[in-house]
Image: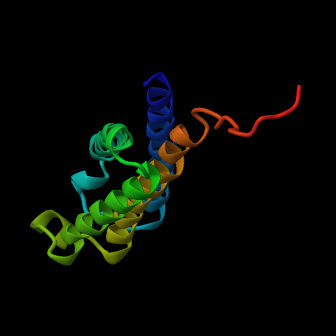
Amino acid sequence: MNRLAKYGLLTVFVAVVANTLVRMITLSVSTVPVGFWPLGWGAVLGSTVLTTGGATIVYGGITRYSKRPNRMFTIVAMVVLLLSFGSFVAPPSVLAAAPTSVLAALAMMHVIVAVVSVGVLTRAADNAETPKSTKNTPT
């Protein structure tokens, strides 16, 4: 559990840094509508922390019950990512007013969270314990 918590914090940190960079670049190169809250600090940081924290909890649950937790978590993360794109296919009114470049940045933030979560969390189990050899070795 301690190892998962460390990897979970690393996941949150890396995703927050990456999404902060995407936000800053987007605001500097795109015309963002006035009052567009999805690119506000609270929305970007809050949603990134919540989704990566949730991914950590889900990964922890999967590792308890799955024989192949990394594969299962990767599948779950990709399904959740695809479902998250629903807000771009049928956008709510707040997203409908945004230019395509801003929507692309928001979609990139979704991808970042998924890729970082899979990339970091699946390493939590990889190095947890070195398998012991079943061979008898001469001493």
Between 112 and 121, which is closer to the camera in this rendering?
A: 121
Residue 23 visible in this rendered orientation of the protein: no
Residue 75 locus on image (x, y percent):
36, 62
Q: Residue at x 44, y 42 (%)?
A: 16
Q: Residue at x 44, y 35 (%)?
A: 8
* For residue 83, side relative to residue 74 (left or right): left
Residue 13 visible in this rendered orientation of the protein: yes
The answer to which image quadrant residue 98 occupies is: bottom left
Colouring rule applied to residues: rainbow
Compared to residue 88, the image places residue 23 above or below, namely above
* For residue 124, side relative to residue 96 (left or right): right
Q: Residue furthest right?
A: 139
Between 26 and 3, which is closer to the camera in this rendering?
A: 3
Image quarter (top left, top right, bottom left or bottom right) of the N terminus? top left
Compared to residue 53, the image places residue 106 above or below, namely below
Count the marks.
Answer: 0
Q: Residue at x 38, y 56 (%)?
A: 72
Image quarter (top left, top right, bottom left or bottom right) of the C terminus? top right
Compared to residue 8, the image places residue 66 above or below, namely below
Between 123 and 71, which is closer to the camera in this rendering?
A: 71
Residue 78 locus on image (x, y percent):
36, 64
Residue 122 locus on image (x, y percent):
50, 47
The answer to which image quadrant residue 59 occupies is: top left
* For residue 98, side relative to residue 120 (left or right): left
Q: Residue furthest left?
A: 93
Compared to residue 4, the image places residue 51 above or below, namely below
Q: Residue furthest top?
A: 2
Residue 36 locus on image (x, y percent):
23, 56
